[in-house]
Structures are given as C-alpha cells and as structure tokens.
Image (spheres, rainbow, N blue to C red):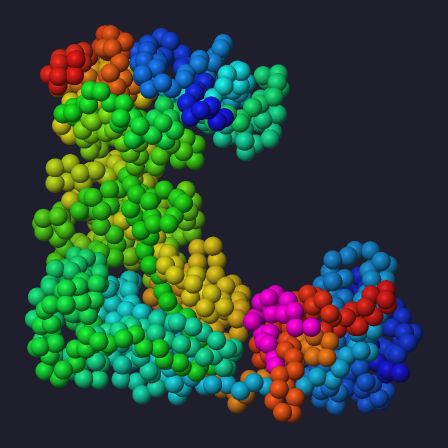
Amino acid sequence: MTPAKNILSYSYYPGCSLHASAQEYDVSTKGLFRQLKIGLQEVPDWICCGATPAHNVDELLSLSLCAKNFSLADRVEGDLAVSCAACFSRLKTTQHKLAANDIKRKQVEAAIDGPVSLAKPVKHLLEILAKDYGLDRLKEKVEKPLAGLKVACYYGCLLTRPPEVPELDDSEAPTIMERVIGAAGAETVAWSHRLECCGANFTLSRPGVVLKLSNEILASAKGAGADCIMVACPLCHGNLDIRQKEIEEASGTRYNMPVFYLTQLLALACGVQTSRLGLESNIVSPMGLLREKNLL
Amino acid sequence: MSRIGVFVCHCGENISRTVDVEKVAAAAARLSGVAYATDYKYMCSDPGQGLLKKAVAEHRLDGIVVAACSPRMHEKTFRNAAKSAGLNPFLCEMANIREHCSWVHEDREEATEKAISIVTMLVERVKKNRKLVPITVPITKRSLVIGGGIAGIQAALDIADAGHEVVLVEREPSIGGHMAQLSETFPTLDCSQCIMTPKMVDVANHPNIRLYTYSEIENVEGYIGNFQVTVRKKARSVDMDKCTGCGVCTAKCPQKKIPNSFDRDLGMRPAIYVPFPQAVPNTPVIDRANCTYFKTGKCGVCQKVCGPGAVDYEQQDELVVEPVGAIVVATGFELYDIGPKPAGSPYEGYGEFGYGTIPDVIDGLTFERLASASGPTGGKIVRPSDGKEPKQVVFIQCVGSRAREKGISYCSKICCMYTAKHTMLYHHKVHDGQAYVFFMDARTPGKNYDEFWRRSIEEEEAVYIRGMVSRLYQKGDKVVVMGSDVLVGVQVEIEADLVVLATAVQARTGADSLAQKLGISYDKYNFYSEAHAKLKPVECATAGIYLAGACQGPKDIPDTVSQASAAAAKVMTLFAKAELEREPIVAKVNERNCVACFYCKKVCPYGAVEEKEIRDRNGNLIRVVAYVNPGVCGGCGTCQATCPSKSVELDGYTDEQVIAMIDAL
C-alpha cells in the first residue's frame, strides 16, 4: 500500500492492553505519530488477538482471532501498525502459519466465515520509525534531545523471536531499539539482560517467578549504569514497573528505575506536550529523573 | 543378413520365476536376423560363457544379445566372452530382463511379453552396432596436488614415493595447514607438531616433489591424463634461491605489531615473517599490505640487513604452466565465522555469544594455539583478556553445526572429540581448574574414540551438561554462561573465566570458484562432491580429479590421511598404465553436416567439444566445425539430443539404432 504523496499513513491495531493497563502507550503512540505527521487510523471494531492464553489452549482459536482482525483491518488504508509486542507476535505468527499451510487456512476460513486476507504487512512501531520513516528524518524532528539520559533498551522475549516470524532484526542480537532511541539523542547502555524473559504471564499465576526474573533484569540494567528502562511491551512494563516495589521488597534492593514505553521517550524528545505522554500512569515516577536531566 | 545369437538367462530363479525364459528364447529364434537362440540357468557362469563361445563358432554369429541382468552387472563379462570367441566385443549387448522386468513385475504372462519386447529391441540395435576399438589416450605421469595440509602432504608423499613427479601447490607461505596449528591430537594425545613437521620436511626434501608455496591455481585446462595447470606464484619479495633462512630480516623488521593469523591473532609478527618456526620452506615473505616500505617507500631495513641479498622489493607475481595427468584436490576447510552475522550469509549469526566483544570468548582453534607448546604462550593456558590462568572453563559444542536456523544442518564431526581433548589438555595444565561442556549429543564413532571421551569425564573430571547456551555476557572479569540442562530440566548459569566455542567446519571461501576452474561439482555447502557416496568416495565425477580431506566434508586427521592415501592410490592406478584406455562409446561429429552452431559445446557437461578448423592443402581456412575429444567425452549423448542438424551421434546409440528399437515394438 503506497502512501500518497510520500505521506505515511497506517491502519492501527492498539490491542486490549493499550485500551486498559497500558493507556499511556496508546496515548504516547498517537501523540508521537501526530507530531511526526504519520497517519494512524484505528481498525474499526478490532477484537482481541488472543494473546498468550488463546494459542496455549487452542491454535485454531488463536489463528482465527488474528485472521478476523486482518479482515477488519482491510477496511482501513495502510499497513497495519502494532504497538504491543504480544499482539505483533500473534499477528505475525498467524500470517506466517497460514501462508504456509493450506489446511489450517481453510479451517480458519470456516471459523471466521470468510476469506483469509494476508496481504497487508504487519509492522511494529519500531520498524515504521526505523525503516519506513527513517532515522535521519526522525533526528530532524527531535526538539528536545534526550542528552545525558542513559537508557537500557529492553526487548523481552517476543519482539524479535522466533527468528523466522517477526523479521524485525537479528533475533538474538538486535539493535533496532538502540538505533531508534539513539536517534532521539539518548545514550544507550550495553547490558546483558536485553532479551531475557521478565516472567510474563506468570505475574498472575506464579508471581514468585516474576519477582525473580524481573529482579535480574532490573539488577542488570542498574549494574550497567542505566537511568531508566525502555520497553515495547505492556506485559514487560507491568512486570518491571508495577511490580517494581514488590521486587525491591523481595530482593532488598532499591532500584527506583523508571520504565518508559518507547513512544513516551520519543514523543518527549519530539516535543509532544508533557501532559500528553501518559507519564502520570507510570507507577515508578519518572518525573524526578526527567527533571534532573532537564527534560521537563 | 545378420546372424545374431540370443542367450536368455534364468539367473537361478531370479528371472525364470516371473518370466517364461523358454518362451522368450523361442520367440527370439523367430526374429529376423537371429541365427540361434537358447536359454540357460546361469549365463554368467563358466559353462554359460562356454555355451556362448561355442555358439559363436558353430553358428558363425556376428552379433550377440544376452538377455539377463543389468549391463552394469555383467556387460563386461559377456563382452570379454565375445572377444575371446573372436567377435568384436561391442557387437555384444545385454537385454536387461531382470531389473527392468522380472524383479519389478508379478504377472508371468505380461512379464514374458515385456521380456520378448526388450529382447526384440536389443536385436534390432545389435544389427546396427559398429565394431568399435577402445580409445587410447596418452598419460602425463605427473600429478598436481592442491593444498599443503595433512591431506595434500600425505597424497603428495605417497605419489612421489611411487616414483611419480608431484607438483604441490599451497596458498599460504608454508605448508602444514590446520594440523600444524594443533596442540595435541585425539585419541592418543600425540603432539601434532611432532608427527606433522617430519612429513613437512620430507615434502621439501623429496626429489619427486616440486613445491610451490604462497601460490594459487590460476587456470586449469585439458582432461584426464593431459591437464595444463597454470599456477600463480605470488610475489614473496624474497628470492627463495638466495635466502638462507637466517632470520635476521624478521628479527630486525621495525614493524612488529601485526597480529599473527597462524596464532589466531593471539601473538604478533613482523611485516617480513615466517608464519611459525617450523615453517616449510623456512623462507620469509613480506606482507606488503602491512610493510612500511610498501606503504610509504621508506624503511628498507630488511634489504639492508640481508647478507645474501635475497630481499627483492621489485618481485612480481609469476605464472608457471605445469603439465599433469591427474589432480588431487586437498584444499581443506575453514571455521564458521561467529560474529553477529557471518559475512555474506543470509542467516543470523551468534550475536548473543559476544564473540569479538568479550575477549575471553574464543574458538577451538584459538584454544589449540593457547595449549600448543609452540604457541604464543608457550603452552600455558591463560585468558586473552588479562593473562590470568582460567579456573573455570566452559566449552560449547555445536556452534553453527546442526543448526538449520543458521544455515548449516550437518554435523562437523570433529568437535565432540576435540572438545573432549581440550578438557583433558586443560586439566593436565590447570589441576585445580574445572571444565564444563555444553553438548547436544556426544558423537564418538571411531577407533578408541568413545573410550577417549569417557576418559575426559571419568578421569579428567570434565562436567558434561546436555543442553544449549542461550547467552554469554561479561560480568566483572567473568563471562556468565546462561544455559540449560535438559536432562535435569533446570536452567544453568556458570560464571566462567574462559569460554571456548566449538565452531562449525565449513568449506573454504572460494571453494566454489576453484571447483569451477577444475570443472568439478560441489554441494550446497560448497564441499566438493565425490562420484559416488559409497563406492567412489575419492573420485570426482570429472575423470582424473580426486579428492582428499575436509574439502569434501568435515573430517578428522585419521580419515583425512586415509582418504589422501586412497586418492594417491587412484592416481598411481591411473599412472600404472602405459596409455589410458577408455570405452569407445563417445560422440562423433559428422563434419560434412555440422553447421558450427556449437550448441553441443554449450551443453557438454564434460567440456569435450572443441572448435576444429578445416583447411585446404594450402592452409587456407575453409570452415570451422565441432570436434569431440574422445579422451574427454563421457558418452552421455546430450550433444546428440541437442544438435539441430543431426550431425553428432553417440556410437552404439545412434538415432538410427534408437528408431529401429522403437519400430520393433
């Protein structure tokens, strides 16, 4: 889908989290794209992608939920922009599996009572910013460089894996987050736990696992000298930000490590009003840090 | 009118169980041109052959069809029988009624009908067979060996010891290859240098071996028995005749900070250097890319200090043409490039292992240099980062091997064994150290191999952990290894002082372009292909070219040496004959009809078609036609199928014969 007159425009699939616990991700995504003059039109009537639960119980259900979203997305112009790492993973996996398997495709067509449409490219925000929009253009738009802010880019498990599905970057040694936030003037730290699991959905069933794994991530980021962590996934954000106080209590370590969505930091750098970044929703308040770095 | 004899074989019951052989013989007897037909239980047996010979004499036969098994099985047998009965052997053909009939059918009646059809076709073909005489080709009894590692050295020594001249071409300044870099070798732990260097010296001193080091193959022309090979002798900048190998130049060279690739960049070398002290020849070479004189025109120290005046800055590359009759390809392997993405690969690499950024993550060959008594540390195992003795060493197997997602699905074959060896060498030198090995499977087929591996665990206390490693990262002065133990089902973290990666064995960069120069085939990994996986493991499909060592696939030293000696034996077999005799089933060009379109030349897989000039008695060029070199032609018939003017035909398979066979049905 070639955008007219070199103006980028996308259909937008926010996913459930961005309408609930991760509203600040949604708000800052929209704010950033408005600032960069990238069109973003929400898919009407979109439904849940099935996330982790669906594909754990029933593959057909998981594929069908995503396929239904593809047919809904076809009503809107532009490649499908996705913010949430899990939605991105599920949608890309569905495309990957259905493109290669006619039998599954027919089953899904029966389930959604319509044709499966796989033509529309699914793109994560990072890909849109780094490849479609371009880092040079992004640099020009930076009004408030994030100079002096040491950012630990956290990819989590899903964004780049498995290698044949997201095709976002090298699956085990990616650099796309560093390149994007680097364009906004931030300093990125080299650290060990960029792609380790935060504990993900165990946050509900076995929170002890999350307290251990997320603690290791926070410790690694802190040890590498990071001021904050940047994420692209609502679930990672929940575990690292919302549970941070519990982690601190369990481990006896004080981190006070703000966890930003990538769009919050980028929107801030590109001059979006601070009140429209959703910063008040972050549990570990980033205000002190941003004030200290003269970014507010 | 022909007088053809048809002999139908029962093959015990192999044929007669399904085919009514008597009926086939009776039907054959009624065919026009058949003078005699019979059946017999075992045609290939001595009485069977006697029957054939007797019939030729009694019935004055001028052609023979043996209806039996595949010609691959017994064509030679019956042609020899025909020959001893005084018949041209190429007037004897086989009708395959076993593999093509009795073995694949069940219905006796239908099978019998088919057998009759097959025999009828062959009778028609034999009627039009010409008497052929085997082709003889002269042989240049010298051999080229490409590659001076252990494979090339072994092949060259064997051929030279048999009394034939050998031209040995090595790309590097010294022969020795990978084996010269190794510390000790499995499964006996004998020192690699100690068993290797005497062979290197033998090569240098052998009167039958002409050694070209720092040289590469530029071009190959010709065919079995008659190759013309152009060798590029790269400018060494040192006159090999004058140099005495005294070593003053290398000692005085002011530029001494060039990483020595022989030592896997652990040590440094000067710009004029011999790669290692035991190098053969012991003649230095100037690394022009790093030499101050070649970069700036100033310095010239080596020339000033050289007593015999051997340093020659003006030396140029030299091309030498060597006629040889056989070629042994022994170009060896290289190791998988571990970076985030190997150069030119569409696949992801191992960015998560931090190789190249974490100094104490090294590969197996680097560990060999650390453990080698002639290595940069004199055999003391220390960490590259700070020179301290590592107390916990983690070895990771299958880095790149058996990894379809990295584009390599094969097993590199040597890593299980050399990793076991590494744990032993380490334990011998660092008694209080602990070695861990992450492995997928331990593959130890080979004489005394499994015992060796068990020893590394039971006596040398290596801890083997079945599972893979997901990430390596630096933490203080340690390298944290994050892995899994899939037998216990837990995640494992080890804080290691040194990590050694057993990286995949790969074909040499440029293996494909050498193969194209030689006209040999290679697989998707650029390993050279043998003619038959089981029965022709050292021959190429291209006649006169043989394979030795890891250029054909990952191999350890014993297998490499065996294959090299086998390749040498094949060369000696070739050279044992006065002339090369070949089957005369080759294509011939009808020069009067040829329109010189040379489609045949384009399609010929053997490169047998040449352009031939026809001149009148005054030497004026009349026309150009295609010519098939019978020494090279493989007899595939592709040219015949392609020729638009029907000017080229394969003897024994002419259009006339094939059409007559079809008409007979």
Image position of B472 with respect to B137: above or below: above
Q: Residue at x 18, y 47 (%)?
A: B360
Q: Tell which of B326 and B399 is nearer to you.
A: B326
Q: Is residue B109 magenta?
A: no
Q: Is residue B612 magenta?
A: yes
Residue B321 at what x, y percent from top left? 40, 80
B474 left or right of B505? left
A102 left or right of B377? right
Q: Residue at x 58, y 16 (%)?
A: A112
Image position of B363 with respect to A124: above or below: below
Residue A213 visible at all: no
Quarter of the image where the C terminus of chain B is located: bottom right
Q: Tell which of A108 and B217 is nearer to you.
A: B217
The magenta span reads B595-614
Q: Tell which of B56 and A268 is nearer to you.
A: A268
Residue A61 at what x, y percent from top left? 52, 18
